[in-house]
Amino acid sequence: MAIRMPRIIKKSSTVADVPKGHFAVYVGEKQKKRFVIPISFLSQPLFQDLLSQAEEEFGFDHPMGGVTIPCSEDVFVDLTSRLNRI
């Protein structure tokens, strides 16, 4: 059984590097890592909880060009791997 992981894209990448049907998020507590994830995650309650936390912590101003998720990279990877199985 294979586990699909969200694609990790270098911070120097541009908006053009995000494929159709995906969006960029930044995850991490100190060092932010950029992930490109499917838009379908937006309809999942677990991901919506993360977005609510991001709104509370960071508001809607995201100077890095993507949404910043306030959790550790390990927690994010675990959550997205579970969402990929749905």
Image (spheres, helix red, strand yellow):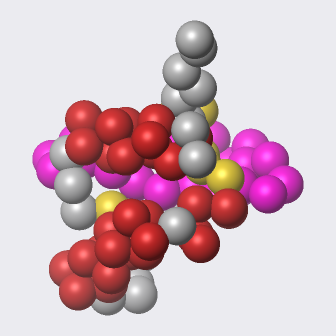
Q: Is residue 69 above or below residue 48?
A: above
Q: Residue at x 44, y 71 (%)?
A: 45
The quadrant in which residue 47 appears is bottom left
User: What is the residue that sits farthest to the left in this orientation?
Assistant: 30
Q: Is residue 86 left or right of residue 72?
A: right
In reply to whether residue 48 is colored magenta, the answer given is no
24 lies left or right of 19: left
Q: Is residue 83 left or right of residue 74?
A: right
Quadrant assignment for the N terminus: top right
- Vertical comparison of 15 with 49: above or below: above
Does the magenta-highlighted stretch encompass residue 25?
Answer: yes
**Position of 33 relative to 51 (above/below):** above
> Is residue 40 at least partly visible in the picture?
yes
Magenta stretch, residue numbers: 9-35
In the rendered image, is residue 67 in sight? no
Residue at image coords 40%, 84%? 61
Q: Going 48% across and 57% down the picture, which residue do you hit?
A: 25
Task: Name the quadrant containing residue 24.
Answer: bottom right
Name the foreground residue: 72 vs 13.
72
Above or below: residue 24 compared with residue 12: below
Q: Quadrant of residue 69?
A: bottom left
In percent of width and height, residue 23 lies at 64, 58
